[in-house]
Image (spheres, grey):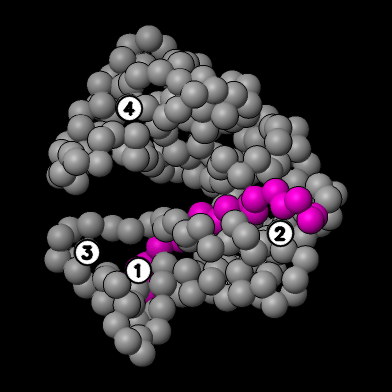
Amino acid sequence: GAAVGESAGETGGRCLRVFDRAGLAVKRMHGGRRYWDRDSSPDVSTCDGGIDCGRRALDTLNGLGGARVLVGPGGKRPDVPYEEHWKLARDFFLALGEEARSRGLAIGAENVECGFPLSVVEWETFLDDIAHPATGMYFDAGNVVWLDYGYPDHWIRALASRILQIHFKGALRGQRVCSLLEGDVDWQAVMGAIRAIRYEGWIIVEPSALPPVVPKETHARTNEKLLRHFYTTQANDM
């Protein structure tokens, strides 16, 4: 946590020293859920508060030597029509994208359970509407299956160069998330799409589907084992 009176940059720098001693590199960061009720708010002060959260996340990541921050695209609100939500979210990402660009960083909107945008075609249009060089998409393959929004390989091929980062987790279609190699995600099709768009960035495994009582060290070892098995299997199948 941050010390009292410590700036976001100072927090990042202090954490970086800890990570350096452990031999770890931090390249990406989740900006938290504070955006979800702010970036689509018609209240200017609420939206500005979301931008401020974003600035602090960017400053922290900058102190860590990272490159990209994940931002939720805003949950639907009963008091905000869908078209207005679109405009508010677009303007929010334009503003925060400029904050990221000024720091030499980037932000990515993820296809999360907030239900906006609703389809891969809308995501293409939304990102093209933003059209900011420091803004793209954090694509979560498992979320497409969990939320029953189609097939992740179709999304990957359609979004292509708009994708900044990819997340992996297992999912049962329309039900829940699960361990990486369980569920209904067609990993061979996903890997084929990733290769087709020539994605060369990091792939992050989200271990949240595993039981919370499992120690973090076990999470890490399990994910490493799964990924090694996953890549070996997919490479042999290609």
Tell me the distance, in whole angstroms, between the alpha carbons under discs 1 and 3.
9 Å
What's the residue at 76%, 51% (across, down)? 78
Label 1 close to label 3 by CB (< 8 Å): yes
Tell me the distance, in whole angstroms, between the alpha carbons under discs 4 and 2.
32 Å
Q: Give the range drawn in magenta.
A: 63-80
Instruction: Please name which of the two marks, 3 or 2, marks the residue nearer to the observer.
Output: 2
Magenta span: predominant SS is loop
Label 3 close to label 4 by CB (< 8 Å): no
Instruction: Please name which of the two marks, 3 or 4, marks the residue nearer to the observer.
Output: 4
Answer with mark 1 or mark 3, whichever residue precedes in sequence: 3
Residue 194: give x, y in percent of width and height. Answer: 51, 28
Tell me the distance, in whole angstroms, between the alpha carbons under discs 3 and 2.
35 Å
Q: Which of 117 and 75 is in front in this view?
A: 75
Q: Mark 3: which amino acid?
A: Phe
Q: Mark 4: which amino acid?
A: Ser
Instruction: Please name which of the two marks, 2 or 1, marks the residue nearer to the observer.
Output: 2
Answer with mark 2 or mark 1, whichever residue precedes in sequence: 2
Residue designated by label 4: 179
